[in-house]
Amino acid sequence: MLYQNENPPPDMRERQRIMVVDNDQDMQSFLNNTLEQEGFDTIVVADADSAAGLVDSLKPDLVIIDSISPEQDNLESLALIRRHSSAPIIMLSPEYEPETMREAFSGGADDYIRMPFGVKPFIARIRAKLRRSQPSL
């Protein structure tokens, strides 16, 4: 897991970096452990304001936002992060209402995953988003 003061130069990075935005410590731990076991570096933050302040400097390759935050509007959080980053954004949510999904995609999400979810399909979706976001050589 990376913290605010740890930022290796982009040419020295070997692992792709994923920012996790979630205020639940159990979910933070689960996502951090799962992603690191799959070979990703993780940046874990508790809220969208912190994430927006770090995406410019830490330049994550992908951002995962848990939509359950009683303190913030989920779409505002998404828009705030999107203003600071063009990295793919995956939104996690227990909701499966078509209107909620439409709003998430309209607000800048690249994927919407309903919780609970299987780890293998989750990782496959992350890898697909990362593959499509990489510049062609």
Image: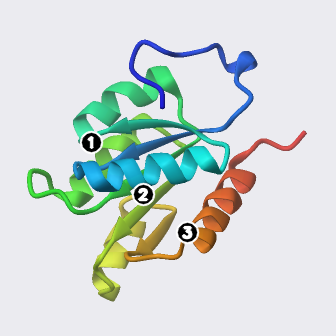
Q: Position of residue 127 (x, y in %)?
A: 68, 57
Density class for disc 1 (Cα within 10 Å; few <14, some 14-19, many ≥20) is many
Side (left or right) of 88 relative to 30: right
Mark 2–mark 3 distance (CA, rounded to whole Å):
23 Å
Query: Which of the two marks, 2 or 1, is nearer to us in this view?
Result: 1
Q: Which mark is residue 48?
A: 1
Question: Which mark is first along the chain, 3 or 2?
Answer: 2
Question: From this viewpoint, is residue 88 visible?
Answer: no
Side (left or right) of 99 relative to 125: left
Side (left or right) of 136 relative to 118: right
- The local secondary structure at tag 1 comes to helix
- Residue type marked 2: Gly
- Residue type marked 3: Val
Nearer to us in this view, 80 or 46: 46
Side (left or right) of 95 relative to 32: left
Query: Which of the two marks, 1 or 3, is nearer to us in this view?
Result: 3
Q: Which residue is mark 3?
A: 119
- Residue type marked 1: Ala
Query: Which of the two marks, 2 or 3, is nearer to us in this view?
Result: 3
Density class for disc 2 (Cα within 10 Å; few <14, some 14-19, many ≥20) is many
Question: From this viewpoint, is residue 106 visible?
Answer: yes
Question: Which mark is first along the chain, 3 or 1?
Answer: 1
- Quadrant of res 41: top right
Looking at the image, residue 79 lies above or below residue 83: below
The C terminus - image quarter: top right
| Residue at (65% x, 51% y) in the render | 38
| Residue at (38% x, 66% y) in the render | 92
| Residue at (23% x, 59% y) in the render | 74
Mark 2–mark 1 distance (CA, rounded to whole Å):
14 Å
Q: Position of residue 121 (x, y in %)?
A: 61, 73
Q: Which mark is residue 108?
A: 2
Density class for disc 3 (Cα within 10 Å; few <14, some 14-19, many ≥20) is few
